Image: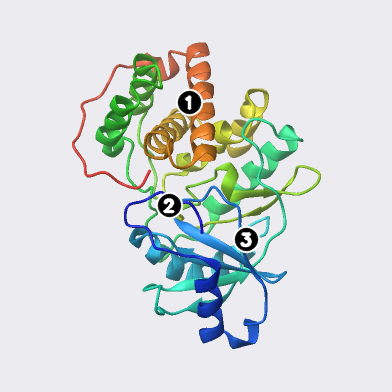
């Protein structure tokens, strides 16, 4: 059974998955079922035979992602330069699982380790090509991303995370970086398609270190393209960040917002998961340290404007 990370998390194990598959997809009932070792937090993943994977929401907040992926992955796939999950079955609620769940094609590959890419320059180019292609997809009818809000609307949640991490981060330094991100102008155009969660656990690389697939589109939808800059700090080492930035065409304002998105996500993840998901917590610490190093080298991005007024908002998914 996967480790629990949430108070309202569903109990899922291999026996339940076998029952679910046998009841609704009997032609796959004889296939072996095996838990996928993943740092994912919203869905449990079980490999089904050699070619399939079962994806089950862990929490109520991830339930709508199943239908969204089932609808939109088919439309997005032809527009993207690497493989994405291909839905092959949509399961309905059963005893033990009150929500829809999905069966998708298995994609081979390994998750990159933050900052330790085998081919950093090539991976930077691959990530830029994916983000650029995603942002060019026709937005007509697209849903809002889970991360469709502005940075200012995340301010209260970020400040709570910084307070909760008083023993783990340099609060003054991260607050200074957060203020710089808040000072950046907001995205000036209409929202575009974004993946919104380009972290190591959602990326697959092949044996050469090239990006071979992007998975988990649960956060995908329309939003600020700066959200898809987070792999600059979540995945890539410092020497290739400028190449990634040039390839995606990010101006100063977008890059500053990208820093803010990476910082806010990492702070909330570290605050929430540091006791329950060591891999995610380790990556979040790395991201925060890389962002602070960048900020120390360029402390006056966008003229070094000061903090903006805080807004009180309801907490959202990290």
- Residue 257 percent across, percent down from the top left: 42, 32
Front-most of 143 and 64? 64
Figure coloring:
rainbow
Mark nearer the N terminus (1 vs 2): 2
Residue drawn at the location 62% of the way across and 82% of the way down: 29
Quarter holding the C terminus? top left
Residue at label 1? 288
Front-most of 64 and 2? 2
Mark nearer the N terminus (1 vs 3): 3
Alpha carbon of mark 3 to alpha carbon of mark 2: how far? 27 Å
Per the image, label 2 sits on a secondary structure element best described as loop
- Is residue 317 shown above or below 52? above
Per the image, label 3 sits on a secondary structure element best described as loop
Q: Is residue 57 left or right of residue 34?
A: left
Residue at label 3? 84
Front-most of 162 and 229? 162
- Is residue 106 shown above or below 277? below
Mark nearer the N terminus (3 vs 2): 2
Alpha carbon of mark 1 to alpha carbon of mark 3: how far? 28 Å
């Amino acid at each position: 059974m996967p480790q629990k990370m949430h108070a309202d998390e569903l109990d899922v194990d291999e026996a339940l998955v076998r029952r679910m598959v046998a009841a609704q997809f009997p032609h796959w009932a004889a296939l072996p079922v095996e838990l996928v070792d993943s740092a994912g937090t919203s869905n449990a993943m079980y490999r089904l035979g050699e070619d399939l994977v079962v994806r089950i929401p862990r929490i109520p907040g991830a339930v709508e992602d199943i239908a969204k992926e089932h609808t939109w992955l088919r439309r997005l796939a032809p527009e993207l330069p690497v493989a994405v999950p291909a839905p092959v079955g949509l399961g309905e609620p059963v005893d033990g699982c009150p929500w829809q769940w999905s069966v998708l094609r298995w994609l081979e590959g390994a998750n990159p380790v933050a900052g330790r890419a085998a081919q950093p320059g090539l991976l930077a180019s691959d990530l830029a090509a994916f983000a650029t292609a995603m942002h060019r997809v026709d937005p007509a009818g697209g849903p809002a991303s889970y991360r469709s809000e502005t940075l200012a609307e995340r301010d209260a949640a970020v400040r709570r995370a910084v307070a909760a991490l008083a023993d783990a981060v340099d609060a003054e330094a991260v607050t200074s970086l957060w203020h710089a991100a808040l000072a950046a102008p907001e995205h000036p155009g209409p929202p575009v398609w974004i993946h919104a969660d380009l972290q190591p656990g959602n990326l697959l690389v092949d044996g050469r270190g090239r990006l071979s697939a992007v998975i988990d589109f649960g956060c995908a939808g329309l939003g600020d393209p700066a959200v898809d800059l987070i792999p600059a700090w979540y995945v890539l080492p410092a020497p290739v960040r400028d190449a990634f930035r040039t390839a995606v065409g990010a101006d100063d304002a977008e890059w500053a917002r990208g820093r803010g998105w990476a910082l806010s996500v990492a702070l909330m993840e570290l605050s929430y998961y540091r006791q329950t998901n060591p891999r995610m917590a380790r990556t979040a610490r790395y991201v925060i340290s890389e962002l602070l190093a960048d900020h120390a080298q360029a402390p006056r991005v966008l003229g070094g404007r000061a903090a903006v007024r805080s807004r009180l908002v309801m907490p959202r998914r990290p």
